[in-house]
Structure formats: structure tokens, C-alpha cells
Amino acid sequence: MSKVFKKTSGNGGLTLYLGKRDYVDNVNVVDKVEGVVKLDPKDFGDRKVFVQLACAFRYGSEDLDVMGLCFRKDIWFECIQLYPESHKPSLGAMHETLLKKAGDNAYPFTFEIPNNLPCSVSLQPGPDDKGKACGVDFEVKTYLAKEKSNPDEKIEKKDTARLIIRKIQYAPTQVGAGPKADVCKNFMMSDKPVHIEASLEKDLYFHGEAIPIKIKIQNESNKTVKKFKVTVDQTTDIVLYSADKYTKTVLNKEFGETVEPNGTYENTLSITPMLNENKEKRGLALDGRLKDEDTNLASTTMLRQGIEKEVLGILVSYKIKINLIVAGGGLLGGLTASDVTVELPLMLMHPKPEVKVSGLSYLITDQFTQSEKNPSGREETGRKEETEGCDATHKVRVMGALEQGTTEPLKRITFLEHQG
């Protein structure tokens, strides 16, 4: 059973229905946004009903809007007139389920999200910050108005119903070879260097997964490596309005192991960067969140080649730094102390969700069409919602094909285990 999300306007005349809140960006194509608006037009007068999907960048609280300044910039939006009816999309399984749930006088709609838009990202607010978090968000809004997208027409909040959705990316099903880096550094008062080599097993890790770092050190110098420091830095590149770029450390771990002069060292160190250890860091990039919902560190941004820079919004990347603290020696003591640093790129993402259908466990792949993807809405605290079997049609289609011996669905799903 999947959730059906619904929001009713203050005047009671508009009710917006969505079957899910997360829409997957597969780099080359994005899930369609399919929904339904139920109308009670007795008090509409000469006004019309529109539904809009907007991607916007928020860089300040709405409470700070003064002197006509707005701290929200639309990156992209599309608006459709629903009533009087002028939009008749092709109905999919999601539409049929939502129409059945909404009942009479319900109007379906479909939006296609361009694949060059950024994913949902929010910047972690400080302890005293209020209002909506800064970042990139997507919003589905239905409203009453006389004209479509007229900035001079004032739309009352009571004539509007809106739901925030998220555009997200999952890790590709195939991971690549892990990065490797090495550094060789000479020191004052030593004629031979310290050499360090660091590598990862693969190029991508999931949020919460332990990351093993293989380290090899050859200390040919006359100095002692006192300890190691491993850090993970998150770089947030805000390219939309001011090209701000800043880096915050999300993990800082120290290993008190030494490597004596002319000694060697080889070991695998494990780290796990987590949001729980960074709750107080204002401005840290997080995966787009729904209200009062736990989230995680922002996923690495994966880009399509040729994407236009002005619509990127926020880019997120990570790197691991391994720092060897080398003690000074001889008469100069601490004056000759130094360090050796090697860096590795890191990708953090979520795995594609595993879903179960009648005892069969399988993984959604990039080859699924929209109507075959499993709806995966999440609960938002404080929102009115109802549960309904949104993916029932999908389950019947898959299982029916299996019973008939059809091989087509088998080309598009990866079976993980059979549970009888």
C-alpha cells in the first residue's frame, strides 16, 4: 500500500492529489508528475483553476521580503489551465487510482520535468533560523485566478493548495573502479621523502555505508609520522545567483598510529560521514527535505553533458583528505614539522529502492517507464493524507506477465531473491 497525498485549499473548493512526493532523475529522463485536482466550483465566479509546477531557488526567508524584494527566484515553471477544462493528458495507472480516490468533478494533469534542472537541495538552517530553508525546491500548486501567471493579480492563500515534491537521483546500478592517489614529499633537513598512497575500492558509496580507505606509507625520511587525520569535505557550489562556493568538513577523524623513520605502514581505515554528527553546521547542503522529515547529507550531483549552467542551482561534491602529521627532529625541532596530504574524490548517493511484488524482490532499473515505476511517496508531518494502493495496477501487470510467460518485464527488472 502506498500513500496518497492530498491538500485542500482554505476555501474548500480545491483539493490537490498526488500519489508520491519523490520523482527520480535518471540523468537522461525524469519521472512525470501525475496528479489530480478535485473541484467544488460553486464559489469560483468568473475565476479559472490552474495547476502549476515550479522549480525555485530560495536564498532568504519570506519574512525578510521588504521593499518589493523577493528572496525566491524561479528557475523554471509550467502552468496548466484545468477549469474550464483545456488540458486532457493521457491517463496512466497513477491517474486512474487518484481519480477513483477523488471521485466526481476531478481533473487529471501531467507535468514533464526537464532533465536539465537541479535536484532538490536544502541548506541546513542555524539553530535560531526560522521559516523555510534556503535551497532548491519543487512545488505543485493549484489556485484560483482570472488569468494564468499574471504577476499583478493577487492570489489569496485561501484560494491555493500546494504540495512540495522532491526531484532526486539514485546511484547508478553499475559502480566504477575506485580512485587512487599518491604523494611523495621531501622535508627540510632530510634527504629522503615520505611516500603515501591511498585508494578506494569503488567510486561511489551509499549514505551511511562504511568507506574503507586503503593506505600505504613508505617513510624513507629521518622523521617520524606521529598520526593520521582523515577528513571528508563537502563543497557546495551555488551557481545560480552569485557563484558562491564554500567547503564544510562533515567528518574529522584522527588515528594515533606512528610510522618510524625508514619504516612502512599498510592498513585499511574505515570512515562513515553522517548528518547526525553535523546537526549544528549552518549552511550544510542536505538532500531536499519535506517538512519535519529527517534527511541526510546532500547526494553528489550527477550532471548531464551540455547542461546549461544558469539552471544548475546548487552543485554538491565531496572529497576525502588523508593528512600525515610528520614530527620535526634535530636542533630545529618543531620548526621542521610538516604534513603530507593526499586527496581522493568521493561520491555519496542513495541506492535505487528495492520493492517487493507477490513474494518476488526486485530492483528498479533505469529502463523502467514511468507507469511501471513503484510510487514511493513519503509522509510529511502535519499534512492531511490518505493511503491507497497506488501501485496495484503495476503489480497486476508484472505478475500477469510472469504468469503468461512473457519475457518483456524480465528485461527491465533485476530479481534479487525469491521468497516462495
Image: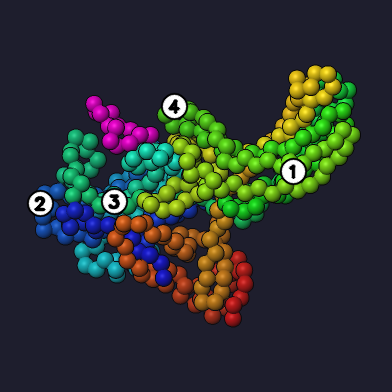
**Mark-to-mark CA distance, 4 and 3:** 29 Å
Pair 2/4: label in front: 4
Q: Quadrant of the C terminus?
A: bottom right
Q: Which residue in the protein does label 2 denote?
A: 45
- The stretch of residues the image draws in magenta is 58-73
Pair 1/4: label in front: 1
Q: Which residue in the protein does label 4 denote?
A: 242
**Mark-to-mark CA distance, 3 and 2:** 21 Å
**Mark-to-mark CA distance, 2 and 4:** 44 Å
> Label 4 sits on what residue type?
Ser
State the image coordinates of residue 24 (x, y, percent, origin top left). Answer: 48, 53
Q: Quadrant of the N terminus?
A: bottom left
Q: Which residue in the protein does label 3 denote?
A: 162
What is the magenta segment's predominant secondary structure? loop
Q: Pointers 1 and 4 in contact (CB under 8 A)?
A: no
Residue at figure coordinates x 29%, y 70% from the top left: 100
Residue at figure coordinates x 55%, y 35% from the top left: 248
> Label 3 sits on what residue type?
Arg
Q: Is residue 66 visible?
A: yes
Which badge, 3 or 1, is on the more N-terminal residue? 3
**Mark-to-mark CA distance, 1 and 2:** 67 Å
